[in-house]
Image (tube, rainbow, N blue to C red):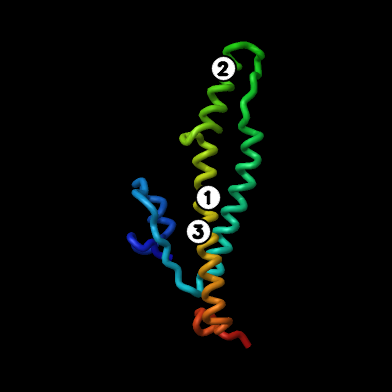
Amino acid sequence: MFLADGGPVTPRAAATNTTTPSGPHKLKIDPSAIPEARKLFEKAMNDLRAQLQQATYDLQARNWAGDPVSKETAQKFNQHTFDGADAAIQALTGYHNQLKAAHDALLRSEQQYTRVEGDNAALWGRSQRA
């Protein structure tokens, strides 16, 4: 896989890159890799969705001591966790949406290649199996 503006993406390079992305990036994938890449994005998207659903319940702070201090603390915690554009859950939801957009784009590309090229194994880069 390649980022259109940054060369190959490797786990080591991704782990050492500490810069904040400045905008959208384009992912270039060899047509033969599209089905597997789409499956990976789909798995990541589904795993994150499950974690978000569980976190919505698990992270909800409650007035544990029944006093004004714990009530205010729970409210502030919940506000920072769930409400507003800077909330943690909102950031994770945004990431989920990005995964879904990438998955959907890969799905459309896969469908387009299948429609145009059919199941021609040579064009998809797959070897014939006997």
Q: Are marks 2 and 1 in contact (CB under 8 Å)?
A: no
Q: Residue at x 53, y 23 (%)?
A: 76
Q: Which mark is residue 53?
A: none
* Residue that protrudes farthest toward the top in the picture: 67
Write down the quadrant of residue 121 in the picture.
bottom right
| Residue at the image position 58 percent from the left and 85 percent from the top | 128
- Above or below, 86 against 8 in this view is above
Within the image, what quadrant is residue 54 found in? top right
Callout 3: helix, strand or loop? helix
Above or below residue 125? Residue 90 is: above
> What kind of element bears circle 2?
helix
Amino acid type, residue under disc 2 in the picture: Glu
Can you tell which quarter of the image residue 103 is in? Answer: bottom right
Which quarter of the figure is the C terminus placed in? bottom right
Who comes first in sequence, dot 3 or dot 1?
1
Q: Position of residue 111 (x, y in %)?
A: 56, 72
Q: Determine whether, in the image, residue 7 is placed left or right of residue 84.
A: left
Q: Nearer the viewer, residue 113 or 40?
A: 113
Q: Earlier in the sequence, mark 2 or mark 3?
A: 2
Q: What is the C-alpha distance between the residues marked 2 and 3?
A: 40 Å
Residue 97 badge: 1
119 or 128: nearer the viewer = 119
Q: Which residue is mark 3?
A: 102
Q: Which quadrant would the N terminus be assigned to in this image?
A: bottom left
User: Where residue 96 appears, x then y in whole percent?
Assistant: 54, 49
Q: Tag 1 or tag 2, which sits nearer the N-term? A: 2
At 65% across and 15% down in the image, what residue appears?
65
SS assignment at label 1: helix
On residue 72, the disc is 2
Report the Cα–Cα distance between label 3 and label 1: 9 Å
Q: Amino acid at mark 3?
A: Ala
